[in-house]
Image (cartoon, helix red, strand yellow):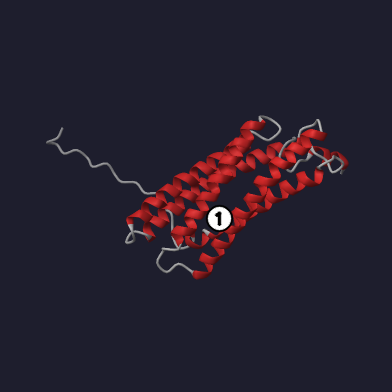
Amino acid sequence: MEDLDKKMSETGAKVPAMCIFTYTLFFGSVAGAVAVCYRNLIMRYLLVNEDQRLMKLNDIGAIIGLISMAGLAGVGAFPVSTVFWAHMLAAGVHFVFAMVYIILQTFINHYVPGANVLVKRLRILFCVAVLLLLFLLVIFFPLSFVKWNKVNSGPPALKTPDDEIFGLMFSSAFFEWVMYGAFLSFISTLSIEFRKFHLTIGVVPVTPKSDEDT
């Protein structure tokens, strides 16, 4: 168990956790992009008779969601122990754009005809939770890194419970994972609309040229 503990990291900083972390985030970014596009198509259908500004807002939301998923792929491509600044930049893009995306979806959902009131409230709750946890993360994350660098020479991604400032680092990681849990919970509520539609891919035959055209 001790040898296994030395090889594992909650941030995907060491092999084999790094491999699992990278492949999981790559898969999540692709699945998330598909969900964003599917959601956009469903909202286009539900809002067809509503204010056209909502349609534009829906398209803007889809673009923001796709940027967020691109950021998630960047987090997977650059684990924290490799190119640190690239990892943090990608994480910042993912978290911020994900926050904006779920706020827009909650706002748009408010104007969908016949939308479930309980689902509306649940999504608002998840939005508030993500916003509050992101606020705490913005405070604790830089504070923990500043204090860590003052007393430790190793990278924070390879921290152990015996290190100084471990509690503060753990709190920062805790807020991050709980925040992401709230975000994934919000995304899971989109399945309520997904189950009411079927995604199909069709083809249209090429119209053959007449003898006169040839």
Does residue 16 appear in the picture of this structure?
A: no
Viewer-proximal residue among 91 and 3? 91
Category of crowding for the residue at label 1, using alpha-carbon neighbours closer than 10 angstroms: few (below 14), some (14–19), many (at least 20): some
- Measured as percent of width and height from the top left, residue 51 is found at 33, 59
Instruction: State the residue at coordinates (29%, 44%).
Output: 205
**Quadrant, the N terminus:** top right
To which quarter of the image does residue 214 belong?
Answer: top left
Viewer-proximal residue among 149 and 53? 149
Position above or below: 199 against 155: below
Does residue 60 appear in the picture of this structure?
A: yes
Locate residue 66 relative to residue 141 in the image: left or right. Answer: left
| Three-letter code for the amino acid on which mark 1 is drawn | Ile
Instruction: State the residue at coordinates (63%, 36%).
Output: 88
- Measured as percent of width and height from the top left, residue 141 is found at 69, 43
- Measured as percent of width and height from the top left, residue 75 is found at 62, 38
Viewer-proximal residue among 181 and 167? 167
Residue ID for mark 1: 187
The residue lying furthest to the left in this view is 212
